[in-house]
Image (spheres, grey):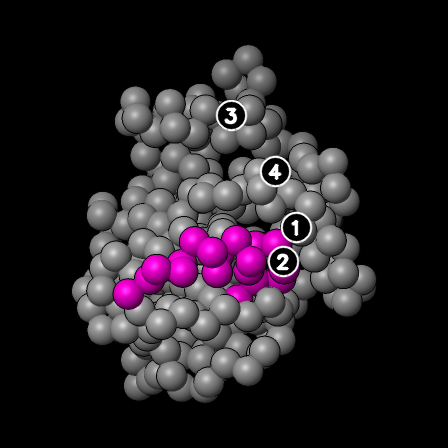
């Protein structure tokens, strides 16, 4: 199932990539979620070697370049996204290394090399969470940090109707499901918050921060106005899960 999902998702992402050009990159962590300037999860990145898992159009790497990192590395399943990122990052101050590859596989990335690995709204696409997190752990230097954000696992389980939340699926039900919001067929993964946390711990990470807060300023409301992540629903349930962890020294 994993390989079939990867083939399907690659085709789908190559098709829909233009719709996601520059969507919610760092310093944003997700729709209606606190930003990096509020959370300071990455700290001072000056001189850091950074790796973006699911780098998309490259806008988060562009943000890291603006903050003075030493090297920019990125991995994405989609050829379209990698080509877009290469173009966007053409004039970067830091050297750029981009790989068209599933996050479940190592396309030639060095081990124990990176100060920071991050993933912004991409980790839920993995067909093998444990393998992906094992890879991330391998890439990091001892003491290096991994920060990721993804849609909060509760968000898709509930819908807002007449100012009430109605659960349409069990929170306990995990695994692959069809991403119905797209015209192009794609497979996503559902995991509980505890599954993310426990798998990180089992892969050798120390959890430092778990964020489930929302940001509901008027600016957020205007910038993220859409049917899926509504301001009204975000007042009752988180849109985004953000976790910061560290590879043990």
Q: Mark 1 points at which residue?
A: 13
Q: In terms of secondary structure, where does tag 2 sit?
A: loop
Q: Earlier in the sequence, mark 2 or mark 1?
A: 1
Q: Residues within 10 Å of mark 1 (few under 14, many from 20)?
A: many
| Residue 155 image-quadrant placement | top right
Q: Name the residue under label 4.
A: 157
Which mark's residue is nearer the viewer, 4 or 3? 3
In x, y percent, where is residue 93?
A: 28, 65
Q: Earlier in the sequence, mark 4 or mark 1?
A: 1
In x, y percent, where is residue 107?
A: 59, 78
| Residue 31 image-quadrant placement | top left
Against 158, is 65 above or below? below
Extent of the magenta region: 75-93
Q: Mark 3 points at which residue?
A: 226
Which mark's residue is nearer the viewer, 4 or 1? 1
Q: Which numbered dot is residue 96?
A: none
Q: Name the residue under label 2.
A: 78
Q: Which of marks 4 and 3 is nearer the N terminus?
A: 4
Q: How far apart are marks 2 and 4 (CA)?
A: 28 Å
Q: Residues within 10 Å of mark 3 (few under 14, many from 20)?
A: few
Q: How many marks?
A: 4
């Amino acid at each position: 199932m994993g390989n079939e999902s990867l083939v399907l998702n690659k085709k789908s992402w190559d098709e829909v990539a233009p719709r996601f050009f520059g969507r919610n990159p760092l310093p944003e962590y997700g729709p209606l979620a606190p930003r990096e300037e509020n959370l300071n999860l990455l700290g001072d990145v000056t001189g850091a070697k950074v790796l973006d898992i699911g780098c998309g159009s490259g806008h988060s790497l562009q943000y890291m370049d603006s903050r003075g990192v030493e090297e920019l590395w990125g991995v994405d399943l989609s050829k379209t996204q990698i080509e877009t990122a290469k173009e966007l990052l053409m004039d970067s101050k830091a050297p750029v290394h981009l790989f068209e590859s599933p996050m479940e596989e190592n396309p030639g990335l060095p081990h124990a090399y990176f100060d920071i690995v991050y993933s912004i709204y991409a980790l839920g696409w993995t067909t093998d969470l444990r393998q992906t997190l094992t890879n991330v752990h391998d890439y990091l230097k001892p003491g290096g940090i991994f920060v990721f954000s993804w849609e909060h696992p509760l968000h898709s389980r509930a819908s807002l109707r007449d100012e009430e939340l109605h659960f349409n699926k069990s929170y306990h039900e995990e695994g692959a499901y069809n991403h119905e919001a797209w015209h192009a067929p794609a497979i996503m993964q559902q995991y509980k918050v505890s599954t993310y946390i426990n798998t990180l711990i089992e892969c050798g990470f120390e959890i430092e921060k778990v964020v489930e807060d929302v940001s509901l300023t008027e600016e957020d409301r205007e910038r993220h106005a859409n049917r899926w992540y509504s301001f009204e629903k975000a007042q009752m349930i988180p849109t985004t899960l953000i976790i910061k962890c560290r590879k043990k020294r």
